Amino acid sequence: MRAWEKNIRRVEPYVPGEQPDSPKMIKLNTNENPYPPAPGVQAACRDFDAESLRLYPDPSCRELAHELAACYGLEDGQIFVGVGSDDVLAMAFLTFFNSDRPVLFPDITYSFYDVWADLFRIPFERPALDEEFRIRKEDYYRENGGIIFPNPNAPTSLFLPLKDVEDIVAHNQDSVVIIDEAYVDFAEESALPLLKKYENLLVVQTFSKSRSMAGMRIGFACGSPRLIQAMKDVKESYNSYTMNRTSLRLGVQAVRDKAYFRETVERIIRTREKAKERMASLGFIFPDSQANFLFVHHPEKDAGEIFSKLKEREIYVRHWDRPRISGWLRITIGTEDQMERLYEALEEILKEK
């Protein structure tokens, strides 16, 4: 090893879902929204002033932060905007998780958490989900340097009731608790109302799922002004101009079209509930999803085999060869037509010997 190689920071990177590019594919592996962005977003794309790209974007993201604050009944100073929720979450790790005590997150959850912890040299522990893949709130009643978990959790799709979320926050007012709500628009309720009671709570959401804008990379955090200002201070010390002008303009339009947002979310939820019936009829078992995906297991067919055979048919789902979940698949809810093609393919695969 060369001398300079000894000083390279080495981490095991996050592995994103496969991004195939085929006109015939059915892409159900990365939880994208199958429907287009809001009409206002599409109109803003057509009318965008490309000449403005010679200018830096607004580093404070004021217009988008204002729209989000108005949408969720918050103050402008309670909103932090970043390049997708991954950027927002990474900035939160860097800002708040600086204790010698371990950060806590579930053993089965979004696999970027341990990557960030390793990258930023943050100690962490992963309390195990129970046998039904549920978070045990009592596992978080102990000394820690911070807590983070998705709600609904990924890839399990399960939602932790708000009373249990509050219980975790209330037991940990000496550390920052982050609720990653990437999928919350497909679930019962957000933790945002708890911000009125707890200044140590940070709620993170994204435009990638319910707002059909994964390609624009917009995420945001909501919290007390003190938490948000701390994140802004770290951001300004790292990279002031994180959000580009196009994302900011289109993000504003996405937030303004509330009717389209509700219509699309409800459409996906209806398809999800039908998918539960169809998957059950095929012999799959799964938790009661409140996300835009199902987490499924077939007791008589290997998950890896199903994954491979679907891929041969250009139908992409997600599979992890990891302890406890190697027998499971995560399937994004697509359009009705896409889901019908999935069911037909699964029927064929399950009949094969």
Image (tube, rainbow, N blue to C red):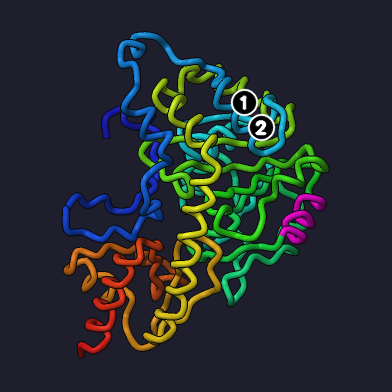
Q: Does the magenta-highlighted stretch encompass residue 221?
A: no
Q: Dots 2 and 1: beta carbons under 8 Å?
A: yes
The amino acid type found where label 1 is placed reads His
Determine whether, in the image, residue 137 is placed left or right of residue 88: right
Point out the image quarter for the N terminus. top left
Nearest to the observer: residue 73 or residue 132? 73
Q: In this view of the protein, which residue sits in the foreground, 126 or 29? A: 29
Distance (Cα) linking label 2 and label 1: 6 Å
Identify the magenta region: 162-171
Judged left or right of residue 20, residue 319 is right
Q: Is residue 169 magenta?
A: yes
Please state the horizontal and vertical placement of residue 5, each as a whole percent of the image: 31, 31
Pick the quarter of the image with the C terminus.
bottom left
Q: Nearer the viewer, residue 249 or 120?
A: 249
- The dot on residue 171 is none
Image coordinates for residue 93, horizontal then vertical, percent: 58, 37
Q: Secondary structure at mark 1?
A: helix
Asked if 95 appears above or below 129 in the picture, the reply is: above
Q: Position of residue 236 (x, y in %)?
A: 55, 17
**Magenta segment main secondary structure:** helix
Residue at the spot of label 1: 66
Which residue is at a point 43% across and 30% down the rendered structure image? Answer: 250
Residue type (three-letter) at the residue carrying disc 2: Ala
Residue 96 occupies which quadrant of the picture?
top right
**Which residue bears the numbered disc 2?**
70
